[in-house]
Amino acid sequence: MTQMLIEKLATTLQIPIKRVEEFLSICYIVTHEKNELIEAKNRVFDKLGYIINGAARIYYVNDKGEEISYLLQVNGDVIGDFASYITGEKSQAKIETLLKTEVLYFEKSKLEKFIQQDIFWLGFSKHLSDLAFLSAKQRLDELFFHTPEQRYINLLKRSPEIIQKIPQKYISSYLGITPQSLSRIRKRIF
Amino acid sequence: MTQMLIEKLATTLQIPIKRVEEFLSICYIVTHEKNELIEAKNRVFDKLGYIINGAARIYYVNDKGEEISYLLQVNGDVIGDFASYITGEKSQAKIETLLKTEVLYFEKSKLEKFIQQDIFWLGFSKHLSDLAFLSAKQRLDELFFHTPEQRYINLLKRSPEIIQKIPQKYISSYLGITPQSLSRIRKRIF
DNA sequence: CGTTCAGTTGACTAAGGTCAATTCCCGTGG
DNA sequence: CCACGGGAATTGACCTTAGTCAACTGAACG
């Protein structure tokens, strides 16, 4: 475990280094191969992951069998279905790596044990919910207030990493449009 | 304070009646007139409200001066900007009642005092964040997976109360379309 | 080389946006 | 009681943009 990762987690999670070290005692790292299906649908998400290095997509398959990319996650992003994590209900989401990807996982049950031992972790747990809310709201705002073209331009600015790492067909789906439309938008804005 | 309201809150918040009674000690009720601007923009939301009876819209004004209805809230819904509530940052949202509306408010600072006295309220506070996340995700899914027409049909099913109480111009904005388009959708689906 | 799949391009369709005119509804004042 | 005014809702004509289906290009890989 590098010092850099610890510091980054401290910043992201807004907790002291000491606490990060404590937290890491219930974490484990898995290295996934490229294009590995790491979560199938119809299961309860009893853990969350943090991408140390790599890229993944969280997607759904609709009734026509089309895959719809709900989220594209890169370094520092979370993977999992937070709704399933908090409600304990089954998730329809599937997760696939797009590159060789190192993920730091922790299990809900372990965090719950922590909470029983030290109330600090309940506050931490609330903070996770707050972060999940804020990122859902951000994505919601993006969809609600902007056109696909604006969303693509915003994505270019906000996350060049996604543009770089992830094939266009997934990006178009994430933006809520077809690959053809994305291709035309790209043509239009240059 | 009616018994019915207490029971409803116990269900909504998923806490025992005893706790609801305790919670109500830091709450107060305000009755707003119809079409009252109850929150201007550029302020921090240090409280949240629960609509006992009535209707309100949470909206933004874009750079063209157009009002965009972000949320339409009726009986049992929350009013406020949860993002501003948790981050302490200023909100661009404005809130206006659409009917004479009774709202149950509580202040963040009061809840924080509660938390210091009894850890139960930290769990409660996390639960609020979870609920906020789930409703943001629900709205996000609605926007991401469905067309405006489907969204209107879903709204008809999910909340006839909104259709009844709230003028179409706000509903169209909430759905992300113009009043003209909503009018055409209504024509189309009958 | 040939296969495969991502990405692009073209022709056409569908749906929502825009602008303007009209109708409907409702409250108010003569 | 009726006429009028004003805003909401509808309708029409036209525009813009994304979807669809199909063909083509290009790069990666065996």
Image (tube, coloured by chain):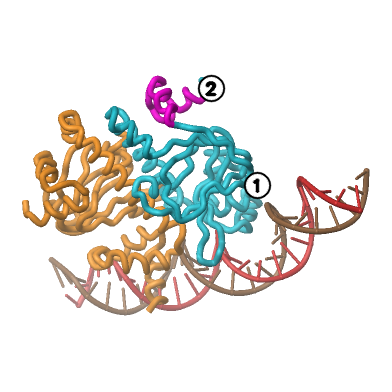
Chain colours: A orange, B cyan, C red, D brown
Q: Are marks 2 and 1 on the same chain?
A: yes
Q: Name the residue rendered at 43%, 30% in the picture.
A: B12
Q: Can I make out residue B47 in this image?
A: yes
Q: Residues within 10 Å of mark 1 (few under 14, many from 20)?
A: few
The stretch drawn in magenta includes residue B25: yes
What span is colored magenta in the figure? B4-26
**In front: A95, or B88?**
B88
Q: Is the magenta region chiefly helix, strand or loop?
A: helix
The residue carrying mark 2 is: B2
**In front: B45, or A170?**
B45
x, y percent for residue A116: 18, 28
Q: Name the residue rendered at 55%, 36% in the picture.
A: B30
Q: Name the residue rendered at 56%, 61% in the picture.
A: B66
The residue carrying mark 1 is: B190
Q: Residues within 10 Å of mark 2 (few under 14, many from 20)?
A: few
Query: Quick check: C6 left or right of C12?
Result: left
Q: Quadrant of residue A105?
A: top left
Q: Secondary structure at mark 2?
A: loop
x, y percent for residue B152: 55, 48
Q: Quadrant of residue A175?
A: bottom left
Q: CA distance from mark 2 to mark 1?
A: 41 Å
Q: Amino acid at mark 1?
A: Phe
User: Can you say whether A64 is above or below B32 in the image?
Assistant: below
x, y percent for residue B107: 42, 38
Q: Amino acid at mark 2?
A: Thr
- The numbered mark 1 sits on a residue in which chain? B
Query: Quick check: B79 left or right of A86?
Result: right
Query: Quick check: A36 left or right of A94?
Result: left
Quadrant of the snapshot with the C terminus of chain A: bottom left
Query: Quick check: B55 left or right of A113?
Result: right
